[in-house]
Amino acid sequence: MPKTTPDEGPGPGERPGPAGRAGPGALLLLGPAFVAAIAYVDPGNVAANLTAGARYGDLLLWVLVLANAIAVLVQYSSAKLGLVTGQSLSEHLGERMRPWPRRLYWLQAELVAAATDVAEVIGGAIALHLLFGLPLWLGGVVVGIVAILILAIQSRRGQRAFELTIIGLLAVIVIGFVFGLVVSGFDAGEAVAGLVPRFEGTDSVLLATSMLGATVMPHAIYLHSALARDRHGHVRDEAGLRRLLRATKTDVLAALVVAGAVNIAMLLLAATALRGAEGTDTIEGAHAAIAAALGPGVAAVFAVGLLASGLASSSVGTYAGQSIIGGLLRVRVPVGVRRLVTLVPAVGLLAVGVDPTWALVLSQVVLSFGIPFALVPLVRATGSVRVMGRWVHPVWLRVLGWAAVAIVTALNALLIALVLAG
């Protein structure tokens, strides 16, 4: 059980964290959730939101609102686990599993990390192709190299510098995907109507399932516990931890409001400017339709936002992969090696001419298999007095957590079944 008595100092190798020191401003405690939020605006989300808006207008807006509400609960739970226990979710699992189950668990998590990287690298490669005409495989290599450079900021400048870099890329993403909506405008009445849960045929169910199922991504669940712990350390001072948990709530809410607004803006943009346009079931087709409807300038800003999304999400995905392998296998892998392990499959798919949109869809299906493996242990851990001590989730949060497990797992199972059925 974690100890939180106020007279305890940090243990060996632990640092007190900002919340344990006197006088840090609340804004200085924010940041980890904005890094984790990159998972919610990655190229996979772009493809799903644009397709939903172009085909069905505002019909599926309610799905994004539901997905964001679940994401707030999941990401706060992950961050809380890291802060209270001083362990990432993967370290927590690694300590409690026997060697062979632990290795098998790592294998499925590694496949999930590779699938995540496929979507992120392909998205960045598509953006470089749209902006500069680079071949897709070369664009994928460039995305991988830039991701390593971004991660080098953490080792050389520290966690805060890394967070600020990712937040800067998030700002570019916001501009890139919101600008088109500002230019085109939207019908507020239709948007409000889109908050009413409903479907229009099997295809809309499939799209809604993919939008919700792809939002709560396994690597973001593992990642946030590591980000919070790496940033703040294991804070054992009771008052400091309470203050830090309050700041974490603000951090998560602010970050996911931004991510949710970006996703909603993408869907509304597609509903306004792309409804009924040909070829909008691919990112390239959506880009061409935006250029035709709103002009090449808006399309260029969109492509820049897509590039920032690919670069940021690829860097964050590699960070998550390092956390997973470190916690489950208890080994430290150099960032360059880690980057290559998940980059090679993505570049390989692009090099052999695989349709990038098909690869994006397939990667989301693989991710669907990994969600219960991350989400169920998180809900169990944060609802356990033995793990969390006095900081255990209250009953109402535990109920909401298991409800989220049921919704996300059922919808992802439905997504897999629908995809396999063609």
Image: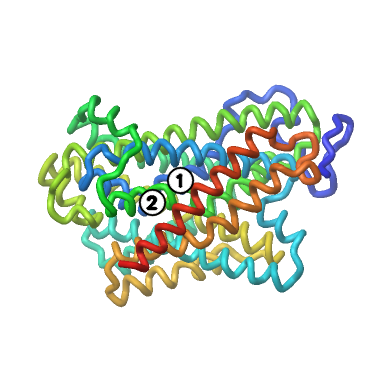
Q: Amino acid at mark 1?
A: Ile
Give the percent coordinates (x, y) of residue 9.
86, 37
Up-down: is 219 above or below 2?
A: below
- 167 and 70: which is toward the camera: 70
Q: Residues within 10 Å of mark 2 (few under 14, many from 20)?
A: many
Give the percent coordinates (x, y) of residue 419.
35, 64
Q: Amino acid at mark 2?
A: Thr
Residue tagged 2: 209
Q: Which mark is residue 38?
A: 1
Residue at horizontal 69%, vertical 43%? 382
Secondary structure of the residue carrying numbered label 1: helix
Q: Residues within 10 Å of mark 1 (few under 14, many from 20)?
A: many
Up-down: is 404 above or below 94?
A: above
Where's the N terminus, which quadrant?
top right
Q: Determine which quarter of the picture holds residue 348.
A: bottom left
Where's the C terminus, which quadrant?
bottom left
Residue at horizontal 54%, vertical 39%? 33
Give the percent coordinates (x, y) of residue 312.
43, 50
Residue at horizontal 34%, vertical 57%? 123
In 3D space, how far apart are the residues under numbered discs 2 and 1 (Cα atoms)?
20 Å
Of the image marks 2 and 1, the number of the one nearer the N terminus: 1
Q: Is residue 316 visible?
A: no
Give the percent coordinates (x, y) of residue 90.
66, 56
Q: Is residue 397 visible?
A: yes
